[in-house]
Image: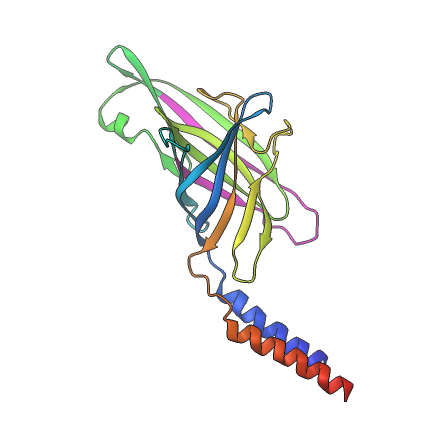
Amino acid sequence: MKKNILLLSMMLQSYSLQSSASSYTMENAALDLYDSEGTHFILNYEMLGGAIDFDNQTGFFDFARPPSHNITVYTDIVEIDQWGGVSGSGDTESHDFTWTTNRYWAGTELVSCNISLGYNGCIDENESGLLLFDQENYSYDFTLSEGQFSLGLFMDWSTNEDIPTLNILQSTHVDINGVITFESVDSDNDGAPGHQMLTAPFVNQTVALSGVLVPVSAVPVPASLWLFVSGLLGLVGFVRKT
């Protein structure tokens, strides 16, 4: 009996390993916005598309507000951190998401752009030869625990570009094909999922995410394997009775 169960476990594990991936598409996702008091006031922007590459720390996701879809949120994933401790240890890890805001003179107006470790949003300003007025550094400092990963985001919302946003996401379920269900956690303890934004135009407001990540290279467990497994378990039970 133990040998048969061990064989079964190894077979299922082999399929699970085949489904491991670093690249995912994002599906069935929702984006919610909370005000500075933690009141949920914008619900369920609809997903237009999304993808995450954990190895290269890149990705994007796009949402639109139903029913008219007249407000669209385009987001670049510019930094990804993952918890890397030993399962069951209860360990936490300290991380940060930092960026620099540059302000340039454009005629008689000041324009701003952001630069992070993995993203340069000031290329156009530099190539245009604009005069740098000043710089300011910002940072989100946070911790990750088991099953969590963070997304450092530059978000375009309506006419506002590259708004720095942090989301700490908890993996709540991983199925046999490596499909990950996730949701934002209340990482700043303000009563709302997500993390309050530090800079204009949405200071102290919070973006929360939830959805599903589907491995690009996922290998589904075939129905024939499940039939074989059920038959094997039935045979084991029959042998034990006889």
Outermost residue on the top side: it is 108
Answer with left or right where residue 92 lies relative to residue 70. Answer: right
Q: Quadrant of the C terminus?
A: bottom right
Outermost residue on the left side: it is 128
Figure disc tally: 0
User: Does 216 sit above or below residue 30?
Assistant: below
User: Does 14 sit above or below residue 88?
Assistant: below
Answer with left or right where residue 131 lies relative to residue 15. Answer: left
Quadrant in the rendering for residue 190 = top right
At x 70% / y 53%, what residue is drawn?
A: 88
Camera-side residue of 14 and 130: 14
At x 52% / y 58%, what residue is drawn?
A: 178
Q: Quadrant of the N terminus?
A: bottom right
Camera-side residue of 166 and 202: 202
At x 23% / y 23%, what residue is drawn?
A: 129
Quadrant in the rendering for residue 4 = bottom right
| Residue 118 at x, y percent in the picture | 40, 39
Answer with left or right where residue 110 lies relative to residue 231. Answer: left
Answer with left or right where residue 120 lies relative to residue 171. Answer: left
Let me know if residue 98 is in the magenta part.
yes
Outermost residue on the front side: it is 67
| Residue 235 at x, y percent in the picture | 67, 83
Camera-side residue of 87 and 41: 41
Q: Main secondary structure of the magenta part?
A: strand
| Residue 154 at x, y percent in the picture | 41, 33
Residue numbers of the magenta segment: 74-102
Outermost residue on the right side: it is 241
| Residue 200 at x, y percent in the picture | 45, 20
Let me know if residue 187 is in the magenta part.
no
